[in-house]
Amino acid sequence: MADIHQSPVILYCFAEQVNSACKVINHSFTAIPQMFKDKEICITYYQHKEYKDKVIEIVLGAVVLTCAFDENDVCISASLFTDDRDNMKPYIDYCNKVYEYSYLLGGWLIEKYYLHIKSGEDGYFFALLPLPPLRNTKTVH
């Protein structure tokens, strides 16, 4: 089995793609395209009856970074869709070697975020979310 640290796709590209996902969280809908001026970007506006939504997709090599927004147009989550959504093993191996895994959150801890795997219509993808606030853990005497 090849050492994943020798794979330039995993070591350099995926690390940078995860870093880009971390950078978009808490940024505005208008600021994010400016952060990726040199990348291919798709902006989608969706509206049905009272429901409105905006999504930004940014092509980062073999991964598409998708930004989801709250009602104030602030990015609240970022998803990474790989070209091969049925073979997540190299990415999972990389995350297991580089990041601490939280069994409580079901994902890897990255700074003030956690990265976990979700399934969608087209296969599996990574979702990055801010860490939830700590619960009140008062000690009972």
Image (cartoon, rainbow, N blue to C red):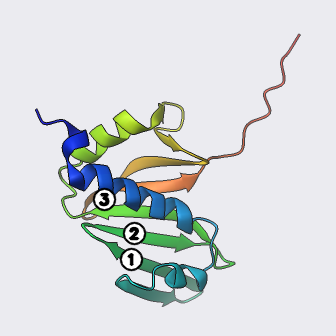
- Vertical order, 125 against 135 (above or below): below
* Place of residue 29 in the rendered image (x, y in percent of width and height, measured from the top left): 58, 81
Outermost residue toward the right in this view = 141
Callout 2 secondary element: strand
> Dot 1 surroundings within 10 Å: few (below 14), some, or many (20 or more)?
many
> Dot 3 surroundings within 10 Å: few (below 14), some, or many (20 or more)?
some
The structure residue drawn at horizontal position 24% and vertical position 64%, both measured from the top left corner, is 122
Task: Please name the residue that numbered disc 3 is placed on.
Answer: 13
Task: Please name the residue that numbered disc 2 is placed on.
Answer: 65
* Place of residue 1 in the rendered image (x, y in percent of width and height, measured from the top left): 10, 32
What whole-number distance in Å separates the C-alpha atoms at marks 1 and 2?
Answer: 5 Å
Q: Amino acid at mark 3?
A: Cys
Q: Nearer the viewer, mark 1 or mark 3?
A: 3
Which corner quadrant holds the C terminus?
top right
Dividing the picture into quadrants, the one containing residue 83 is bottom left
Labelled pair 1, 2 in contact (Cβ < 8 Å): yes
The structure residue drawn at horizontal position 43% and vertical position 47%, both measured from the top left corner, is 116
Task: Please name the residue that numbered disc 1 is placed on.
Answer: 58
Front-most of residues 140 and 76: 76
